[in-house]
Image (cartoon, grey):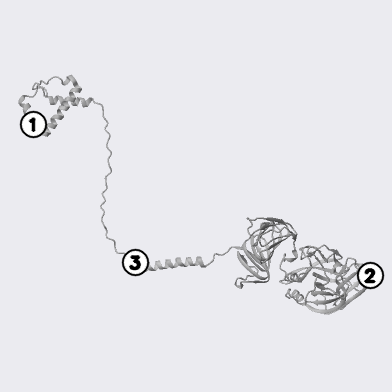
Amino acid sequence: MENVISDDDFMELNEILRENPKAMELYFEFMSTCSSLYRELGETISEPCHRSPEEPNDMQSLWLALAEEERTAATVHIPKPKEEPPRLTVQLQEVAKPERKISKFSIFSVAVSLAAVLLLVAYVRLVPVPKPIVGVLTDSHNARWADTASSIAVGDHLQSGYMDLQSGFAEMTFDNGAKVIIEGPAQFELESEGEIFLQKGKISCVVPPRAIGFTVGTPAATVVDFGTEFGVVVQESGRTETHVFRGQVELRTGPDALVFDDSRRLGAGQGSTVDENENLLQRRFRARANEFIRNELIPYEIAVRKSNPFAYWRFDTSEKAVFQDILMNKFQPCELHGNIKIVPGPELGNSKTSGAVQLDGQNSYVYVPKAGERKEVGREMNRNYSYSFWVRPDVIRAQDLITITNSGAAQYRHIGLDNDGRFSFFTYYFKNQKRRSEFTGNAIFQPGQWYHVVVTGTWSKSMQSQVCLYVNGQKDAEKLVHSTYSPKFYGHFYIGSVPEEGKVEGIHSFDGTITEVVEYSRTLTPQEVREIYSSVQY
């Protein structure tokens, strides 16, 4: 404003600035702008502005300078401010809850659903889950179970669980192929297709190769099979005996097959014991195969075994001319002479038959050496004896059935038929060719018919024996006869005839069929004879 404004104008300007704060603010802003321009432009605006009426005034010059500066200035980029999203305003209003009405149908639906849930829970708790099938009952004989409601029939499937066989025999075949025969009384539990727990009783097992590892557990021991045949006996106390007939097993202490303190590998013919305290006894023993039912449940065979025989022989139909030792389950060494055929024998109960030897009556016979010695069972024949067999004559004449002699052939005991078809018994002394102690029965045999025959002898100190003859379970005749018989030296057994040097004049070789030859080292009672015969259930 210097040299431009007059004094009066200056005084008026001061008055305006004093009274008007807005004007003071504009004046201050104007002067600041002029100062900034002066610093930037220097001489351009340093001279006082002496304008003529035609020249533009100072304000016009100022705006012209500003316009020129704006035109030549560099472009300045000003960042665009971020736009904030619009805010939503939510106004909450309290809404009145409608009154809810519960229908009768809803109440009924809830009640039905609750009843269904309760019924399902009760079913799960009260109805047991079906137990797995482990095998089949393949045979039985006079089996009586403790719980009659759970009695099973042959052919029924067997579930895992506890069973109590009070008496009789039961044959079970597991799904893995293992077959067991259990003799009552026995308590046991079927645990799986490869394991049975025998609480007490007697069991025999036949295990094929595909079932190797089959296990019999007891309260004191565990028997693990390695593809074999064996038997186990468990006493009331838990004491366990293991008998191996074929192959091998491992006997382990304790009821757990995987956790045990001691074990022993047993082979064929060996036996061992674990006592009730789970101690493996050091002493081994010879397996007593004769104490077990091993092959199949033939009622007659079961009855014979129960009578504790000394020896039991049968002719096997699977191979020609073999003499099977039933008690030891092996083939008895024997000699076959003449024309011999193996044919089916009599029915022995439950429609089961055995093999039989057919002799042609032309000096054909079977010779069993040392039949009176049974090292396997550790005993010999004593002075009391019994013989049992089945016979079917094809012709009726005087003929030999069975002859027993000592090793020196000094005496022959003949059991046969006379010319009338009656049962006959006598002792023949070879050296002087004399027949003594001879007597005959009363029943008359018919050709082509099977007969069950038993001969018993009870020795007395007076060198005499009471001999009884039984036919089909009934006593046919008896007689007290002279006897110098010393059974200890009698072990040779002839079936059908004897060698030529031992023949008795007038006695022919047997013409017919014979089987199931049993020898006892004691006298059978009449009751035992009846029970053995009645087992065939004719």
Horizontally, residue 69 falls left or right of residue 398, namely left
| Left or right for 172, reference 103 | right
User: Is 30 placed left or right of 412 in the picture?
Assistant: left
Nearest to N terminus: mark 2 or mark 1: 1
Q: Quadrant of residue 315?
A: bottom right
Is label 3 or label 1 in front? Answer: 1
Give the farthest residue toward the bottom.
442
Give residue 151's position: percent from left, percent from top.
62, 71
Contact flag, marks 2 and 3 (Cβ < 8 Å): no
Look at discs 2 and 3 and give the one toward the viewer.
2
- Decide if residue 316 is in sight here: no
At label 3, the amino acid type is: Ile
Residue 432 locus on image (x, y percent): 95, 71
Name the outermost residue toward the right: 432
Question: Which element carries disc 2, helix, strand or loop?
Answer: loop
Does residue 349 show up?
yes
Q: Which residue is mark 1?
A: 16
- Seen from the viewer's position, the closer of residues 395 and 20 is 20
Q: Amino acid at mark 1?
A: Ile
Q: Are marks 3 and 1 in contact (CB under 8 Å)?
A: no
**Mark 3 surroundings within 10 Å by alpha-carbon count, few (fewer than 14), some (14 through 19), many (20 or more):** few
Image mark for residue 476: none
**Sequence order check: which comes first, mark 3 or mark 1?**
1
Per the model, the C-alpha gap separating discs 3 and 1 is: 86 Å
Read off the residue under disc 2. 431
Look at label 2 and name its amino acid: Lys
Q: Residue drawn 84% across and 77% down?
A: 466
Q: Nearer the viewer, mark 2 or mark 1?
A: 2
* Place of residue 194 in the rendered image (x, y in percent of width and height, measured from the top left): 64, 59
Rendering quarter of residue 47: top left
Q: Which residue is mark 3?
A: 102
Q: CA distance from mark 2 to mark 1?
A: 184 Å
